[in-house]
Amino acid sequence: MQSISTRQLLPLLFTFFLVSTVTPIALGQQSSDGKWKATYMTDGSDTREAEIELNGNAGTWMTWPRPNKDKKDACVNRPFPVTVTKIAQGSMTIQMMASTSVSGCKDRNATLEPASDGTWSGKLDNGSKITLQRTK
């Protein structure tokens, strides 16, 4: 049986350390993938809900119509493209680009942090709070 010298052992230990620390980080970056229910406030202080579906750096945002309202609003019940940017310490920014699909619809940006309960929470570009809760 051949013994391993310290010189041979150090690269093995470094590789083990690197794999054990980087793999969870890389896997954790995809933790935002899936379907989410977003709850947020509009500029007019109305509570709104949307379905957000994320896959890597892209996805869709579809604002749900309110009961007995929004029947003729072209900006609701329609999926709009989003881009996802991962930023420091596990947080992300979602940019919803409604105006690229329908003229007059408002684009939104949300900066979100992961919470210990599996949700994401943060603020929209208008300063209001937004929370994402996983649906699938």
Image: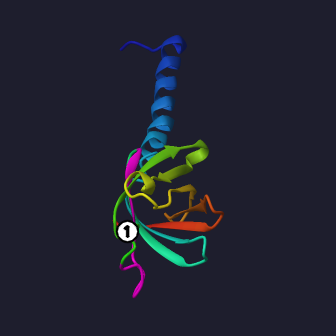
Q: Residue furthest front?
A: 103
Relative depth, front residue between 100 and 134 = 100
- Could you tell me which residue is drawn at 39 percent across and 45 percent down? 56
Asked if 63 appears above or below 7 in the picture, the reply is below
Badge 1, how many Cα within 10 Å: few under 14, some, many 20+? few
Q: Position of residue 66 (x, y in %)?
A: 42, 81
**Residue lying furthest right:** 127
Q: Which residues are magenta?
A: 57-71
Q: Is residue 67 magenta?
A: yes
Q: Which quadrant of the rendered structure holds the C terminus?
A: bottom left
| Residue 110 image offset from top left, x and y in percent | 55, 57
Horizontal side of 114 relative to 65 (left or right) equals right
As for residue 48 lying within the magenta part, the answer is: no
One can see residue 54 in this view: no
- Quadrant where the image shows the N terminus: top left
Query: Which residue is tagged 1?
Result: 74
Residue ID at (37%, 68%): 74
Is residue 8 visible from the viewing direction of this image?
A: yes
Residue 68, quarter of the rendered image:
bottom left
